[in-house]
Image (spheres, rainbow, N blue to C red):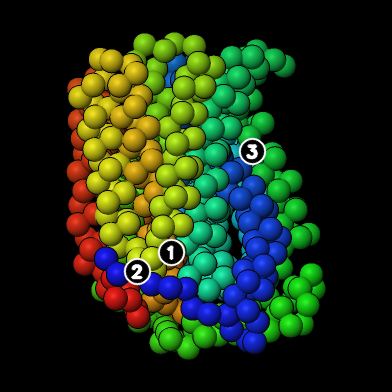
Amino acid sequence: MTTHTAVPGLAGISLSQRDALYRKVAWRLIPLLFLCYIVAYLDRVNVGFAKLQMLGALQFSDTVYGLGAGVFFVGYFIFEVPSNVILHHVGARKWIARIMITWGLLSAAMMFVRSPASFYALRFLLGAAEAGFFPGIILYLTYWFPVERRGKMTSLFIAAIPVSGIIGGPLSGWILKNMASVAGMAGWQWLFVLQGLPTVLVGLLVLRYLDDRVSGARWLSEDERRSIAADIGAEAARKTETRIGSTLLSGKVWLLAIIYFALTSGLYGVSFWLPSIIKSMGVADPLQVGLLSMIPWLFGVIAMVAAARSADRRLEQRWHTAVAAVVGAAGLFMSVELHGNQMLAMTGLTIATMGIMATLPVFWTLPTTLLSGAGAAAGIALINSFGNLSGFSAPFLIGLIHDITHSTDAGLHMLAGLLVAGAVLVLLVRPMNRAA
């Protein structure tokens, strides 16, 4: 594994001045983007907690739940590429705000679900509304941070996934337990309302505070804007401008999409089924389920930030991603084999979450070093949308397997196998201008 030193400061500023400049940019952008992704991920996976009451109340099977949880990603897949291309042309501020406001309203509307058909329809529309959010932010970060800083920034953004688990677990459990029958509504209905409407408010914050590009950032001086533009321009000069059509047909882009599918299969398997897995260990109280679900996500944050910093420091992504994926697979296997012991099974789930979360920010540095221009918007969206089809297949297959075998064990073995496959495939990727 080759170790690299970060490039020196550009545009006539020292490395320490450059570090201070990017800290300033990070403090301005990352907290808002982090908040956006927290509410995004809560809205995406709170159905996993709603399931604890919803299935019994509406007489849904696990297969119906798995299909409904996953059909979100069908709408997401269909609208992902066009959404990201629109963002590239109209700007992040308006488009991210539009995405968040529409999906917040649709998430709150999940309280009206009464039948499998309405469950499927609203989950599909929710996916269509959210399409473009995650790849849009990944693309947006390339406008502000050069590649040697992007892994860390991406990790700080993606840290919202485990943090939403830390916050969302106890919050969801509390809502299910304490809001049941308030104003004649069930706890699962309040869950969707109380976690959906705040997304609308955050969308309005985006409309007010987010800047589309460095050139329009009035909180930066002219010299600071020129310095960042020089860094981003130097990276762009090392890339070949990619067109949308050629990007969508690129074998390397499709390889990255398949790898991301394998990695996110583990993520969504854990995200959608963690509450049920904990409940199957003998924990009945929803609040206790929520509190226990914090543990894997808390350690996931630590692992993700540590892996991203290590990858940035060494300018190496493939081995970091592969090793983390294998660790995730080992944790899933451990959680299955030791499910009779609650503490050891939770340890396995925690190791799995750490490994899975550590893959994500490091992986996303790979496509952003290969693509530029409108091709980057389309390629990042394609990789994310295809990868996120695992959000359809993983919950559905685990639900189907559970209905057949009355256990999630075989489903978790399947996810572990996919993580190992992703680890092998990522080593085939040859990033631009890297010795690793």
The secondary structure type at the circle numbered 3 is: helix
Is 372 rendered above or below residue 413?
below
Q: Contact (CB < 8 A) between labels 2 and 1?
A: yes
Q: Position of residue 387 (x, y in %)?
A: 35, 55
Is 299 rendered above or below residue 255?
above
- Image mark for residue 196: 3
Dot 1 surroundings within 10 Å: few (below 14), some, or many (20 or more)?
Answer: some
Residue under numbered circle 1 = 313
Position of the C terminus, as image quadrant, is bottom left
Q: Is residue 121 left or right of residue 62?
A: right
Q: CA distance from mark 2 to mark 3?
A: 45 Å
Q: CA distance from mark 3 to mark 1?
A: 38 Å
Q: Earlier in the sequence, mark 2 or mark 3?
A: 2
Q: Earlier in the sequence, mark 3 or mark 1?
A: 3
Viewer-nearest residue: 40 or 7: 7
Numbered label tally: 3
Q: Position of residue 435 (x, y in %)?
A: 29, 76
Q: Contact (CB < 8 A) between labels 3 and 1?
A: no
The secondary structure type at the circle numbered 1 is: helix
Residue under numbered circle 2 = 3
